């Protein structure tokens, strides 16, 4: 503390020293405020004071961002309009962050930015959802540009030779290894040999969770291996956490952040339980839903897996950005294929998403982060 108790000749010097002290304090406070403005407590990237992932859905007549009938890449299971869905209101909603506007996806700008680059999505059918959405967005931006698309095993590759850009998808439901052995198929929580195929890309977008809960005939493994211990089953949330920990250690050890940008796609929700959004019909699902949940919060709260993702990402040394799509997707109970996942109207898919639709917003968020002024680095969470 600076004190002034001498004569008048010393007052000017005290005033000057106090002014310098005040400027230093204000500078430090502003620097701290600026840092906090860029990231919220979940590690989601913000610009200024805007959290891209907090907001609501607004009707917008200019949507969707592309004509579904003009996109040749959409999986039959996601092409709700072609499969006979009679309403189109679900196509007309735009995500509006509370404190800012989400920039509209500009495919030409995206392609110029990533000219000569290789992008890879790694994950399950929700990654397929987002990958096909991005392909539609890019194709709609440069419809006259020749493209190539190939598939070899679990790797699908889309490329635009004019721009030297490739956007690939590696189908991998668990990220960690699923291995066929004499005893049967084993899910190895601490092994990630398949990660060798992910090296050499300029951007990686990972996703896993959808398959961790499957049981019975839909469960693709017979045993779970944890170290040297082989189990018939275990708590799936614990297994998910251990598998994700193996993945983060692989990223920290094998990905050079100078050359490769890494994202983790957040937990994509399902809508099989109407009680989550306070539907008066207790048997309600996504079937027949035509409008989003109003407001900025989801009555059912965040799924436990989302907390696991946040906890695991907070331990990483490498800069990995979370595409925190969970809440905004929870609000879209109307966005699933439901009975329009095929032409015969059978089934009720409340897990995947219609295209065009919600995954287009996931890619808008990806675009917004990539083109924001702040590098997409996830801070540590205490």
Image (cartoon, rainbow, N blue to C red):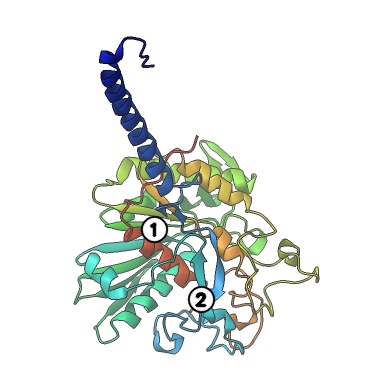
Q: Which mark is residue 77?
A: none
Which residue does the image show at 50% across and 84% down from the upper left?
61
Q: Is residue 373 above or below residue 75?
A: above
Secondary structure found at label 2: loop
- The residues tagged by marks 2 and 1 sit, at their Cα atoms, a distance apart of 19 Å
Residue 129 appearing in the image? no
Q: Which quadrant does the N terminus fall into? A: top left
Q: Which one is in front in this view, the residue at disc 2 or the one at disc 1?
A: 2
Residue 203 appearing in the image? yes
Secondary structure found at label 1: strand
Image position, residue 311 (x, y; %) = 52, 41
Q: Is residue 6 above or below residue 319?
A: above
Image position, residue 168 (x, y; %) = 33, 67
Mark 2 and mark 1 residues within 8 Å of each other at the beta carbon: no
Q: Which mark is residue 357?
A: 2
Crowding near the residue tagged with mark 1, few <14, some 14–19, many ≥20 C-alpha atoms within 10 Å = many
308 sits left or right of 360 in the view: right
Crowding near the residue tagged with mark 2, few <14, some 14–19, many ≥20 C-alpha atoms within 10 Å = many
Question: Closer to the camera, 157 or 282?
Answer: 282
Look at mark 1 in the image and give the residue it sits on: 205
Image position, residue 156 (x, y; %) = 36, 70
Which label's residue is closer to the chain start, 2 or 1? 1
264 sits left or right of 311 in the view: left
Q: Is residue 137 above or below residue 268?
A: below
Give the number of callouts.
2
Image position, residue 293 (x, y; %) = 65, 69
Question: Closer to the camera, 280 or 273?
Answer: 280
Which residue does the image show at 44% across and 38% down from the upper left?
380
Among the 4 quarters of the image, the one containing residue 89:
bottom right
Question: Closer to the camera, 336 or 230?
Answer: 336
The residue furthest front is 8
The residue furthest top is 6
């Amino acid at each position: 503390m600076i004190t002034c108790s001498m004569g008048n000749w010393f007052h000017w010097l005290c005033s000057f020293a106090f002014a310098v002290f005040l400027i230093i304090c204000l500078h430090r406070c502003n620097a701290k405020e600026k840092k906090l403005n860029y990231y919220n407590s979940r590690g989601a990237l913000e610009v200024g004071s805007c959290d891209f992932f907090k907001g609501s859905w607004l009707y917008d007549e200019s949507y969707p961002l592309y004509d579904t009938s003009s996109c040749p890449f959409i999986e039959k299971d996601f092409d709700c309009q072609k499969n006979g869905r009679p309403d189109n209101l679900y196509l007309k909603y735009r995500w509006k962050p509370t404190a800012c506007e989400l920039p509209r996806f500009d495919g030409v700008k995206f392609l110029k930015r990533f000219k000569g680059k290789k992008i890879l999505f790694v994950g399950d059918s929700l990654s397929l959802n987002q990958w096909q959405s991005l392909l539609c967005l890019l194709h709609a931006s440069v419809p006259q540009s020749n493209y190539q698309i190939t598939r070899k095993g679990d790797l699908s590759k889309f490329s635009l030779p004019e721009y030297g850009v490739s956007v690939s998808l590696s189908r991998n439901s668990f990220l960690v290894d699923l291995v066929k052995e004499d005893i049967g198929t084993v899910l190895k929580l601490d092994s990630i040999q398949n990660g060798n195929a992910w090296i050499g890309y300029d951007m990686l977008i990972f996703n896993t969770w959808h398959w961790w809960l499957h049981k019975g005939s839909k469960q693709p493994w017979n045993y779970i291996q944890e170290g040297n211990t082989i189990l018939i089953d275990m708590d799936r949330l614990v297994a998910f956490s251990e598998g994700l920990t193996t993945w983060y250690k692989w990223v920290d050890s094998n990905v050079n952040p100078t050359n490769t940008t890494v994202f983790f796609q957040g937990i994509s929700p399902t809508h099989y339980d109407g009680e989550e959004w306070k539907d008066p019909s207790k048997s309600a699902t996504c079937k027949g839903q035509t409008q989003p949940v109003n407001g900025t919060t989801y009555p059912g709260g965040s799924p436990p897996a989302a907390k696991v993702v946040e906890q695991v990402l907070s331990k990483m040394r490498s800069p990995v950005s979370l595409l925190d799509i969970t809440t905004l997707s929870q609000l879209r109970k109307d966005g699933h294929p439901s009975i329009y996942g095929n032409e015969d109207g059978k089934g009720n898919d409340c897990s995947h998403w219609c295209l065009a639709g919600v995954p287009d917003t996931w890619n808008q968020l990806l675009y917004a982060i990539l083109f924001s002024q702040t590098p997409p680095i996830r801070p540590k969470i205490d």
